[in-house]
Image (tube, rainbow, N blue to C red):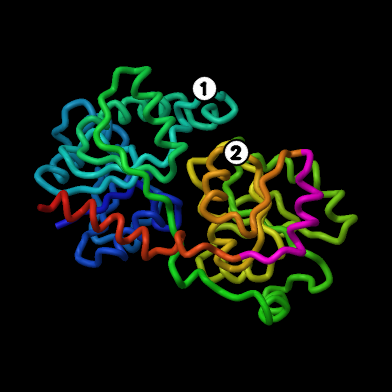
């Protein structure tokens, strides 16, 4: 049996990824290795944690390999959905979404507490215990190889599997925009720019404050999800409301200065929303598979690009649908289970 291990709640990025994998393989078990006691464990088949002093329990497990997490992992086929528990691995699969806690760019890495950066470095060193490592982009694969080479870490087989969106995310905007705006209390006389991101430095959200006034003069308003930078913002919402916000919007704005992938870009395209994105490696990689409806620009060109994009049509390439991603994981799991 396959055990898919998340270290975070299902509404988080890691949790959504683990849940997506679980949906591909209904006979698998979705397990929470709980790092934060305040995060709800709803939706998991099993939860592994220490009732008291959980962080100390994780450290004990890390040092001795005899704690609850290592004991649970013993002799099981695991897919570790993030590096946070690579130390329990004995074969199996692990996913590295990015290396931001180890970034040489302090504007990126300083977001993470010093103790977590040390912990993450230790976990990445255990990558050698895996049989397969999955990364979401060739950009992340290159970063991982460079880091491994510089630090004498032996990498297992690394496979790039780009993220996807479920078919339930595909919707037509035509005929639905004004209906949904009325339902959500959004203005019908403005063009709407949407961003979905947590407010951390690498997301580049400070630029919203720089361009807000100019966009207002041009008849735009800004909606944000999971951060408070927008003229109107939404926090901790479910996929149903997120889809409605995409449909109600005219442009998706991705000003990130670094990404391992950037799933909201393909979610927006799935809802026929054109994208303006900062020209960075991960965004160029998405563009190479889906150039229709995406404008890659420098920061000084954000506003003209947003105006241009608001008149564009957009469509998601079928490459980014869940069918392709499911089949790629099936091949890996079949080989490991053989």
Instruction: Reply above or below: 105 against 33.
Output: above
Numbered marks: total: 2
Instruction: Reply above or below: 78 against 234.
Output: above
Q: Residue at x 81, y 50 (%)?
A: 304
**Horizontally, is 246 left or right of 240 in the view?**
right
Instruction: Reply above or below: 37 against 274.
Output: above
Q: Residue at x 36, y 25 (%)?
A: 121
**Horizontally, is 291 left or right of 219 in the view?**
left
Q: Is residue 324 magenta?
A: no
Query: CA gap, disc 1 to disc 2?
Result: 16 Å
Q: Nearer the viewer, residue 39 or 226?
A: 226
Q: Nearer the viewer, residue 96 or 52?
A: 96
Circles 1 and 2, Cβ within 8 Å, touching? The answer is no
- In the picture, the disc for residue 244 is none
Depth check, mark 1 against mark 2: the one in front is: 2
Picture quarter containing residue 284?
top right
Q: Which residues are magenta?
A: 300-314
Q: Is residue 313 magenta?
A: yes
Image quarter in which the N terminus is found: bottom left
**Horizontally, is 160 left or right of 228 in the view?**
left
Q: Main secondary structure of the magenta part?
A: helix
Q: Residue at x 57, y 45 (%)?
A: 283
Residue 105, given in percent of the width and then of the height, sits at 56, 24
Residue 86, given in percent of the width and then of the height, sits at 26, 36
Callout 1 environment at 10 Å: few (<14), some (14 to 19), or many (20+)?
A: few
Mark 2 — residue?
280
Q: Callout 2: helix, strand or loop?
A: loop
Mark 1 — residue?
104
Q: Callout 1: helix, strand or loop?
A: loop
Instruction: Reply above or below: 89 against 250.
Output: above
Callout 2 environment at 10 Å: few (<14), some (14 to 19), or many (20+)?
A: some
**Horizontally, is 112 left or right of 203 in the view?**
left
């Amino acid at each position: 049996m396959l055990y898919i291990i998340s270290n975070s709640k299902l509404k988080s990025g890691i949790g959504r990824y683990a849940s997506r994998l679980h949906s591909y393989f209904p006979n698998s078990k979705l397990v929470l290795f709980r790092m934060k006691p305040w995060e709800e464990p709803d939706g998991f088949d099993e939860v592994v944690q220490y009732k008291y002093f959980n962080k100390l329990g994780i450290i004990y497990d890390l040092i001795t390999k005899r704690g609850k997490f290592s004991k649970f992992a013993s002799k099981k086929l695991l897919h570790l959905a993030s590096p946070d528990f690579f130390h329990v691995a004995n074969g199996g699969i692990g996913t590295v979404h990015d290396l931001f806690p180890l970034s040489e760019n302090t504007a990126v890495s300083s977001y993470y507490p010093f103790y977590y950066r040390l912990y993450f470095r230790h976990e990445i060193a255990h990558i050698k215990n895996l049989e397969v490592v999955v990364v979401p982009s060739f950009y992340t694969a290159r970063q991982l190889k460079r880091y491994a080479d510089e630090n004498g870490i032996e990498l297992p087989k690394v496979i790039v599997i780009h993220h996807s969106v479920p078919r339930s995310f595909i919707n037509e905007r035509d005929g639905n925009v004004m209906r949904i705006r009325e339902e959500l209390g959004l203005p019908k006389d403005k063009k709407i720019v949407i961003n979905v991101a947590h407010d951390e430095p690498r997301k580049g959200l400070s630029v919203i404050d720089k361009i807000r006034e100019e966009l207002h003069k041009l008849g735009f308003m800004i909606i944000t999800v999971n951060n408070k930078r927008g003229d109107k913002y939404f926090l901790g919402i479910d996929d149903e409301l997120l889809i409605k916000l995409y449909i109600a919007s005219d442009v998706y704005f991705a000003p990130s200065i670094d990404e391992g992938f950037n799933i909201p870009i393909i979610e927006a395209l799935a809802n026929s929303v054109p994208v303006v994105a900062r020209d960075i490696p991960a965004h160029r990689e998405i563009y190479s598979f889906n150039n229709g409806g995406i404008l890659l620009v420098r920061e000084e060109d954000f506003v003209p690009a947003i105006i241009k994009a608001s008149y564009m049509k957009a469509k998601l390439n079928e490459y980014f649908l869940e069918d392709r991603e499911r089949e790629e994981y099936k091949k890996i799991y079949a080989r490991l289970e053989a």
